[in-house]
Amino acid sequence: MIDCDSLVKIYKTDEVEVMALQGLELTIKKGELMAVIGKSGSGKSTLLNMIGGLERPTAGKLYVDGKDLFAMTDKELVEYRKHTVGFVWQKNSRNLLPYMTALENVQVPMYFDKDNKEDREARAYDLLCKVGLKEKVNSYPAQMSGGEQQRVAIAIALANNPKILLADEPTGAVDSKTSDMIQDLFRKLNEEMGITVIIVTHDISLANKVGRVVMIADGKISTEKIMKEDYRKRINDMESESFNGTDSHEEYSIMDKAHRVQISDDILEAAGIDTNKVKIQVVDGKVVISKE
């Protein structure tokens, strides 16, 4: 579904240049449920904005659903944002119009899609039922909790049948119980609708709820965690709110096209490596990195 090839993004001001992405490479399959995790300034939101067609790279290529996103004209990008991606933002003020009911809010994106001939109100009602808000369809945002508002926002993001759902810190403004509920909702929508879901967050607890976790550090993919199959089966059979899995994922370091691998500070410290010179050997078929 998504193929990022050597993505570079540089933000420039009169005085400074900041490299948000440094040759990032990432492939995302159709129907994946995944999280992109990293510290503030690591480049995760920049990546999300590029997949969403909101920013163009300084260098590199990005293919979505077989199309070269950055060969598109501005008009083509508008159509792409209308039909291919749905956005869920952290702040509800970016998701909802306060003077409209939940039912009216969900219908708003449909009015911008001239090809949408189906009954807008009926579809909006169906989407609100999918996110568990059947009793709140005629409520205004001020009459709903933060978690309910965020679920309306997810219904809005699904209004025009997107292939990809992009969520930027969707649980950042809610309590842990509501966060669990929203995470479970993403998993349910992914399974039932087959939609590709990408969640950008700094919330490590998300790792227990998604099939794949990608860690970004210094504008590159540093590690990936893949959910183990036995854990996937267990979490599907249990209430995930009360299930705190341990040893749920297998972690891998990512080697880029130039055969470079990032090593975390924790690993370097544990190995006693405190200089930029290391010894690399192959021992019994394994690559061993040791202190100079």
Image: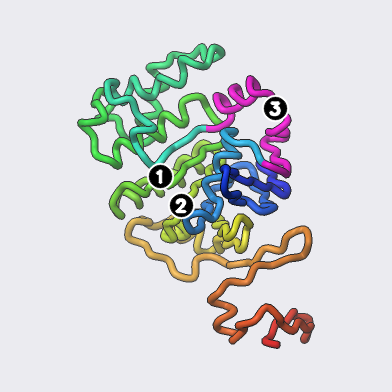
In the visual, does 188 lie left or right of 85?
left
- Identity of the amino acid at label 1? Pro
Q: Position of residue 267 (x, y in %)?
A: 57, 78
CA distance separating discs 2 and 1: 8 Å
Mark 2 near mark 1, Cβ–Cβ under 8 Å? yes
- Identity of the amino acid at label 3? Met
Disc with the residue nearer the chain's start (2 vs 1): 1
Image quadrant in which the N terminus is located: top right
Q: Which residues are magenta?
A: 58-85
Q: Is residue 162 magenta?
A: no
The residue at the point 56 percent across, 51 percent down is 43
Image height check: is 65 above or below 181?
Answer: above
Q: Position of residue 248 (x, y in %)?
A: 50, 66
Callout in the foreground (1, 3)? 3
Disc with the residue nearer the chain's start (1 vs 3): 3
- Identity of the amino acid at label 2? Thr
Label 1, secondary structure: give it: loop
The reply to whether residue 75 is visible in this rendering is yes
Which residue carries the number 1 mark?
A: 170
Which residue carries the number 2 mark?
A: 201
Q: Residues within 10 Å of mark 3 (few under 14, many from 20)?
A: few
Q: Position of residue 110 (x, y in %)?
A: 46, 18
Label 3, secondary structure: give it: loop
CA distance separating discs 1 and 3: 28 Å
The residue at the point 54 percent across, 65 percent down is 249
Disc with the residue nearer the chain's start (3 vs 2): 3
Which residue carries the number 3 mark?
A: 72
Label 2, secondary structure: give it: strand
Q: Residues within 10 Å of mark 2 (few under 14, many from 20)?
A: many
